[in-house]
Amino acid sequence: MNTAYRFGGFELNPVTRQLLAEGLPVALGARALDVLLALIERRERLVTKEELLELVWPGLVVEENNLQVQISALRKILGPQSIATIPGRGYRFAAVLGADEALPAAASAAAASSREAPSIAVLPFLNMGGDPEKDYFADGITEDVITELSRWRSLAVTSRNSTFRFKGKSVDMQRLGRELGVRFLVKGSVRRMGERIRITAQLIDAESGNHVWGERFDRPLADLFAVQDQVVHTIVGTLVGRVQASGAERTRRKPPSSLDAYDHVLRGNALAWDDPASAAEAKRAFERAIEIDPGYGLPHSLLAALVGRDWENDLSAPRETLDRAFALAQRAVELAE
């Protein structure tokens, strides 16, 4: 059974791929997380450098220095004694992890579910160019999308190691979602044609098997990184929108304790959100409703929708915009429970 590992003041949940320090999220890269999980899961023994390289970078030729960089990053966060070096051989997880410090993953997953953190896995993008030697290009784009999605603390992103096991396999999306323990799946393809590139991406609801979003990008090769940013931008915005919609549906069932707050919600909802001035006025109305009745979930949800629109309509919007939308949507869900 998977566990949420506790050691010292830290907790690592392999399901949500989140490291907490005294209950607060810690920024940790996807590779460093993979290294830490590999060491903890094999904590009873030495893990050789070769084994770690294969576990974290499967099928890739990687310099040993890359592993040393991740070990160094982990020691800076966890403390220098957390990972022991066995000279010339490898590493061992050295922090104390007692039986009373391990919680069932189901409990941690349930807690994550109650906070409505969308869980997502990115499947290896298909190389549609017909040349197997160009697989590395599609794999690299897949890894970049995983890495960028992992930067969002509001998402639970499955590791590369978990999803690349299914490379080249035809698998039912609903069954795959259950096996990976995620609600959403991203699949796509890459075709490189000289100095142009075509990328398709699809977001799938693994519970129903339905397509949530899909798009094809035909661009000059020089625009590759802009396309990757747009794919991630759209996926994150869509998932946060799902949380907001869930909160809106639930909070409409709970009446407010203040008619004044309700009046502000009605005023904001009656405005034309497509007009910038009206949208700004609607935001102020919802913010005022929250001030009057902080326990009223509906204005949180509606404000989340408006802030989320700011993000969707502006590719240059700061990350804090979407963080705020997600926090408001989460709060709406919590108030509806």
Image: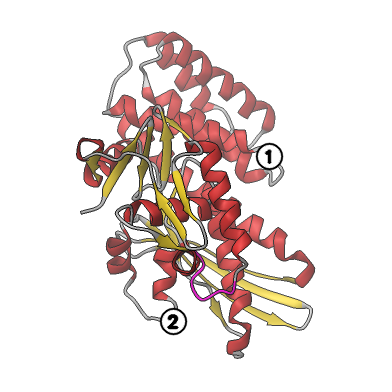
Numbered mark located on residue 168 in the image:
2
Q: Name the residue nearer the viewer: 302 or 154.
A: 154
Residue 46's quadrant in the figure? Answer: bottom left
Disc 2, SS: loop
Q: Which residue is mark 1?
A: 317
**Where 21 sits versus 59, above or below?**
above
Q: Which residues are magenta?
A: 56-61
Q: Amino acid at mark 2?
A: Gly
Location of residue 159 in the rendering, given as x and y in whole percent from the top left corner: 44, 58
Query: Could you tell me which quadrant the C terminus lies in?
Result: top left
Residue 255's quadrant in the figure? Answer: top left
Q: Is residue 306 visible?
A: no
**Where 144 sits versus 134, above or below?**
above
Q: Residue at x 28, y 64 (%)?
A: 179
**Where 227 sits versus 119, above or below?**
below
- Position of 253 with respect to 219 (left or right) is left
Q: Is residue 41 visible?
A: yes
Location of residue 230 in the rendering, given as x and y in whole percent from the top left corner: 64, 56
Residue 259's quadrant in the figure? Answer: top left
Residue 22 belongs to magenta span: no
Q: Nearer the viewer, mark 2 or mark 1?
A: 2
- Position of 296 with respect to 134 (left or right) is left
Q: Name the residue nearer the viewer: 334 or 82.
A: 82
Disc 1, SS: loop
Q: Residue at x 75, y 77 (%)?
A: 196
Q: Main secondary structure of the magenta part?
A: loop
The residues tagged by marks 2 and 1 sit, at their Cα atoms, a distance apart of: 36 Å
Query: Could you tell me which quadrant the N terminus lies in?
Result: bottom left
How many residues crowd mark 1 within 10 Å: few (<14), some (14–19), many (20+)?
A: few
